[in-house]
Image (cartoon, grey):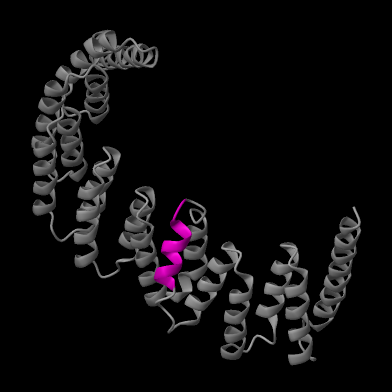
């Protein structure tokens, strides 16, 4: 019995303590890495990687410090070794291309990414994954190329459309971004609110508003485009033209003046009291039984009051 106990202790000791030592060494290397002592971290990570080359944590950590130390050839070597273990891991191809890019070998980076696309041509995830690595290195033209290819082969191109629009926005190609968003509104009008919020998030950037209006103005077959056109004109402070569009929306849609009422409130908040009173009155005259009629009458009274105050203030200024 004593012999068996000693034997079990020895067996467990052999299994437990080396693993505990590996864990402690890994934690020590992490501490070095976090403290910016990358050379010390590298020495330990290399030791651990040699012991367990199949361990992804050790591979990932070693690759990180190689990048920090700009030892790109070593990073390439461990990635290629990892690819032999996991040849279907698309992220490894993306990472390998990234290292070549960091090494200033853009041609080799593109060739690596292109090879990954060719290896997994029917998987939409491949195109997005590789595009993300290209974006990380600010290789936007390559990212756009991959996303457009992915958009062509997928049954649901929406995610690629959003990705492309984001890149176009980032690179100040607002007309191209608007074309992507408009194509999405056309095919998926239920996505309108989300798309409008995306567009409004960058619309105050130089030239974004004019370029976007130019694109949206060419679309007039769906009511969503009228909403968007009017909203952009409101951003441009061209409220009278926006009002004309809202009148057309009101004819096409049975909302009992709700859209006109909302526009009147916007004009009121912008202190365009004359226009606001005109729109509130339009609601009152057209829809006496509308659910918003009481609010419209109150809004009309408030705008008339504010318009009078504004006029009197102007008269006072003229005496000075």
124 displayed left or right of 203 = left
Question: Would residue 209 be counted in the magenta stretch?
Answer: yes
- Quadrant for residue 227, please give it: bottom right
- As rendered, which of 192 and 104 lies closer to the eye? 104
Q: Position of residue 309 (x, y in %)?
A: 89, 64
Q: Quadrant of the N terminus?
A: top left
Q: Is residue 111 above or below residue 273?
A: above
Q: Is residue 253 above or below residue 275?
A: below
Q: Is residue 125 above or below residue 25?
A: below
Q: Position of residue 61 (x, y in %)?
A: 27, 23
320 displayed left or right of 10 = right
36 displayed left or right of 217 = left
160 displayed left or right of 275 = left
Asked if residue 193 can be seen in this view, the reply is yes
Q: Is residue 101 above or below residue 174?
A: above
Taking the spot 24% from the left edge, 54% from the top edge, the residue there is 144
Taking the spot 31% from the left edge, 16% from the top edge, the residue there is 26
Furthest-front residue in this view: 319
* Count of residue discs: 0
Q: Position of residue 16 (x, y in %)?
A: 29, 16
Q: Position of residue 91 (x, y in %)?
A: 21, 42
Taking the spot 14% from the left edge, 31% from the top edge, the residue there is 79
In the rendered structure, which segment of residues is drawn in magenta? 206-216
């Amino acid at each position: 019995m004593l012999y068996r106990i000693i034997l079990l202790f020895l067996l467990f000791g052999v299994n437990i303590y080396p693993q505990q030592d590996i864990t402690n060494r890994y934690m020590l290397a992490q501490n070095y890495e976090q403290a910016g002592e990358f050379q010390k971290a590298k020495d330990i990570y290399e030791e651990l990687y040699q012991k367990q080359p199949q361990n992804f944590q050790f591979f990932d950590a070693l690759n990180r410090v190689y990048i920090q130390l700009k030892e790109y050839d070593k990073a390439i070597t461990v990635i290629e070794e990892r690819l032999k273990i996991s040849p279907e891991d698309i992220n490894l191809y993306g990472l390998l291309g990234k290292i070549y890019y960091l090494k200033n070998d853009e041609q080799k980076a593109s060739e690596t990414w292109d090879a990954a696309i060719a290896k997994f041509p029917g998987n939409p995830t491949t195109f997005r994954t590789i595009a993300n690595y290209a974006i990380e290195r600010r290789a936007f033209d390559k990212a756009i190329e991959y996303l457009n290819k992915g958009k062509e082969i997928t049954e649901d191109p929406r995610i690629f459309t959003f990705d492309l629009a984001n890149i176009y926005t980032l690179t100040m190609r607002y007309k191209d971004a608007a074309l992507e968003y408009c194509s999405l509104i056309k095919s998926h009008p239920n996505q309108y609110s989300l798309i409008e919020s995306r567009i409004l998030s960058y619309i105050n950037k130089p030239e974004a508003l004019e370029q976007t209006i130019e694109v949206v103005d060419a679309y007039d077959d769906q009511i969503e485009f009228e909403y968007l056109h009017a909203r952009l004109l409101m951003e441009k402070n061209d409220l009278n033209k926006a009002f004309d569009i809202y009148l057309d929306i009101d004819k096409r849609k049975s909302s009992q003046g709700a859209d006109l009422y909302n526009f009147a409130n916007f004009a009121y908040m912008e202190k365009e009291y004359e226009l606001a009173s005109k729109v509130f009155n339009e609601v009152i005259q057209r829809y006496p039984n509308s659910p918003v009629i009481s609010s419209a009458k109150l809004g009309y009274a408030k705008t008339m009051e504010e318009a009078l105050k504004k006029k009197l203030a102007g008269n006072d200024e003229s005496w000075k």
